[in-house]
Image: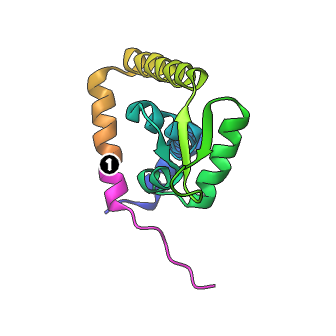
Amino acid sequence: MATRMQIERMLEKLKHAHPDDFFKHVDETQAGIGAVLRLLYISNDTVTAGKISDELMVSTARVAVLLKKMASKGLITKEHSPIDARITLVKLTEYGAKTIEEMRDGMYQQMGIVIDTVGEERLLEFITIAEEIKNAITPPKFDF
């Protein structure tokens, strides 16, 4: 069983490494504009706002906010379905496609730097260990 000293040393190392900064950024991208752009890019067609909500597992209200922001930036076009005005149809603009391609290129560049810095074997080991840690941890429950 881990000693208190080992636990405190690991917590201190984690505090200085700030892995949550990296993962927070990844999570925001996954559930935000980047995820919607990626979904539209992959589909290469018009997608309903409801499908975006379902695919990304976020609320329709969150999708509505994202789509409004994205439309104002010229990344997408939105229109009502000719069959049912309650359905919003979303399509990637040329600028949106260029943006997602640039995001992908940036992500590839960053991952290349990580692999070059850490090494592929060590990175794979880290990912495996991170998955094991995630599976071993259950958040503490508080009764307030």
Q: Is residue 91 magenta?
A: no
Residue at image position (45%, 52%) is: 51
Vertical side of 41 occupied by 127: above or below: below
Q: Residue furthest bottom?
A: 143
Residue corresponding to mark 1 = 131
Vertical side of 16 occupied by 95: above or below: above
Q: Residue furthest front?
A: 83
Question: Along the line of sight, which residue is nearer the eye, 105 or 100?
Answer: 100
The segment highlighted magenta reads 131-144
Question: Along the line of sight, which residue is nearer the eye, 49 or 131?
Answer: 49
Quadrant location of the N terminus in the rendered image: bottom left
Q: Tell me: 127 left or right of 55.
A: left
Q: Tell me: 78 left or right of 45.
A: right
Question: Along the line of sight, which residue is nearer the eye, 5 or 85?
Answer: 85
Residue at image position (40%, 60%) is: 3
> Residue 33 at what x, y percent from top left?
58, 39
Q: Tell me: 81 left or right of 70.
A: left
> Residue 45 at what x, y percent from top left?
43, 34
